[in-house]
Image: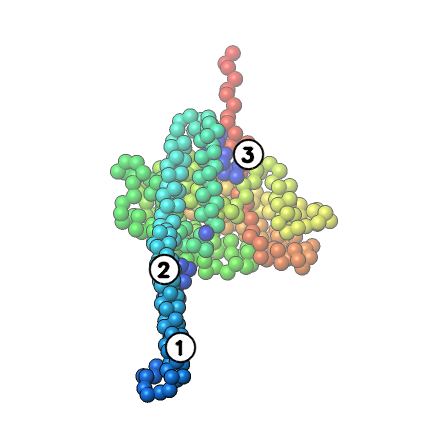
């Protein structure tokens, strides 16, 4: 049996107002204040001249007041301008986050290529770093339909860092440019998929992802593909970790029925039907395995076979949920239609444990 890897262990254990404000302030010119008309002094009586002097004083005071207001306005605009210049732009913030992501990836790669880690001896500090990096991939899955450009940048960073090394594996400028375009188009396509029904959305997401990853595989060389497949690293770039549930084959029916109960808020009277539907799902997947369409291992993540399996798994789950829907209330049916469908990844728990040492010969 194969030894478990740190990635598998973690997998299983596992977002310009200022410019607008400045522009709006600058575009609003101060309205001129009305002042009393000036009349040249003539041979008027003393009372009239006294009135004219009073009007002139009032006009002078009004001008002084207006000048003071203009000076205050200018000082405020100058202060706003300094603040806007000092504030980092959104692009700069994204660059810093992307640089931090690259650093975390390099630490992850170092742990994954450590012989001691491959043997299962991962120290607590390294495990914390692994978990923190895994959280970045959860965040990546959360933004891929909302911020396709950021999503594309992060995925490209994964491939660039993952393939760092000698000249046989590092990405060429042409490959980097092609990958950036592929991932950006992928994110945009995902953002256009209707959010409901959730099952149909998940199927479309897997189809889109499978097509993109197939083109990525064609773009990479043999040594590059081999390096990414080592230690299950390619599992990080394939799939949506926010919608995936890794379920042990042992006790899968109970795990799945409990998950459906929580997702759709089933009551106690619906538990038997949920288990029947979960058993129907597992029976269908077992039949597919018997026909030679076995569940691909983690080392095959991102392969055409893995996407074929994922599509079959979602379709069989939808068929099982259709059986369960007959006992659902209208509110539960609405949750079924709108809530994100969990994607089940069934694994044999016994095959991921460390093989026992052979008994000594007698």
Q: Is residue 291 visible?
A: no
Rounded to the nearest angstrom, the CA distance separating label 1 from label 3 is 97 Å
Mark 1 crowdedness (10 Å alpha carbons): few <14, some 14-19, many ≥20: few
* 220 sits to left or right of 280: left
Q: Residues within 10 Å of mark 3 (few under 14, many from 20)?
A: few
Q: Nearer the viewer, mark 2 or mark 3?
A: 2
What residue is rendered at 43% in x and 29% in y?
A: 118
Image coords of residue 96 (percent x, y): 37, 45
| Residue 138 against residue 353 in the figure, above or below | below
- Residue 274 visible, this orientation: yes
- Element type at mark 2: helix
* Label number found at residue 349: 3
Answer yes or no: do the residues labelled 2 and 3 have beta carbons within 8 Å? no
Q: Secondary structure at mark 3?
A: helix
Q: Position of residue 274 (x, y in %)?
A: 66, 48
- For marks 1 and 3, give the one nearer the viewer: 1
Q: Is residue 83 above or below residue 41?
A: above
Tell me the number on the disc at residue 54: 1
Label drawn at residue 265:
none
Residue at 32% x, 38% y is: 164
In the rendered image, residue 108, in percent from the top left (x then y), is placed at: 41, 35
Q: Position of residue 23 (x, y in %)?
A: 37, 65
- Which residue in the protein does label 2 denote? 75
Residue with the most extreme top position: 362
Q: Nearer the viewer, residue 318 or 143?
A: 143
Compare marks 1 and 3 and give the one earlier in the sequence: 1
Q: Earlier in the sequence, mark 2 or mark 1?
A: 1
Task: Indicate whether 103 appears above or below 328.
Answer: above
Q: Are the residues tagged 1 and 3 within 8 Å (C-beta)?
A: no
Decide which of tag 2 and tag 3 comes sooner along the chain: 2
Query: What residue do we see at 41% from left, 62% from top?
Result: 21
């Amino acid at each position: 049996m194969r030894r478990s890897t740190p990635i598998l262990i973690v997998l299983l254990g596992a977002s310009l107002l200022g410019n607008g404000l400045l522009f709006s302030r600058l575009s609003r010119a101060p309205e001129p204040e009305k002042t009393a008309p000036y009349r040249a002094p003539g041979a008027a009586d003393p009372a009239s001249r006294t009135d004219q002097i009073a009007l002139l004083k009032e006009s002078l005071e009004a001008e002084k007041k207006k000048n003071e207001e203009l000076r205050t306005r200018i000082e405020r605009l100058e202060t706003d301008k300094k603040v806007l210049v000092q504030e980092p732009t959104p692009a700069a913030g994204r660059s810093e986050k992307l640089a931090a992501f690259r650093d975390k990836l390099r630490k992850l790669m170092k742990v994954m290529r450590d012989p001691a880690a491959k043997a299962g001896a991962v120290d607590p500090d390294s495990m914390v770093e692994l978990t923190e990096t895994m959280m970045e991939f959860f965040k990546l899955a959360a933004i891929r339909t909302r911020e396709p450009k950021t999503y594309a940048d992060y995925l490209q960073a994964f491939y660039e860092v993952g393939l760092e090394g000698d000249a046989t594996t590092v990405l060429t400028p042409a490959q980097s440019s092609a990958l950036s375009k592929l991932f950006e188009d992928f994110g945009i396509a995902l953002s256009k998929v209707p959010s409901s029904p959730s099952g149909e959305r998940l199927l479309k997401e897997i189809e889109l992802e499978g097509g993109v990853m197939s083109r990525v595989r064609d773009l990479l060389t043999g040594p590059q593909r081999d390096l990414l497949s080592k230690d299950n690293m390619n599992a990080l770039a394939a799939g949506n970790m926010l919608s995936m549930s890794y379920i042990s084959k042992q006790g899968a029916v109970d795990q799945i029925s409990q998950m459906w109960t929580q997702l759709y808020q089933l009551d106690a009277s619906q538990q038997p039907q949920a288990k029947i539907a979960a058993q129907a799902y597992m029976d269908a997947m077992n039949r597919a395995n018997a026909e030679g369409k076995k569940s691909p291992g983690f080392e095959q993540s991102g392969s055409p076979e893995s996407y074929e399996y994922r599509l079959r798994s979602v379709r069989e789950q939808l068929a099982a949920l259709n059986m369960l829907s007959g006992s659902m209330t209208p509110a539960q049916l609405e949750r079924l239609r709108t809530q994100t469908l969990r994607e089940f990844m069934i694994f044999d728990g016994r095959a991921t444990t460390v093989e026992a040492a052979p008994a000594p010969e007698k």
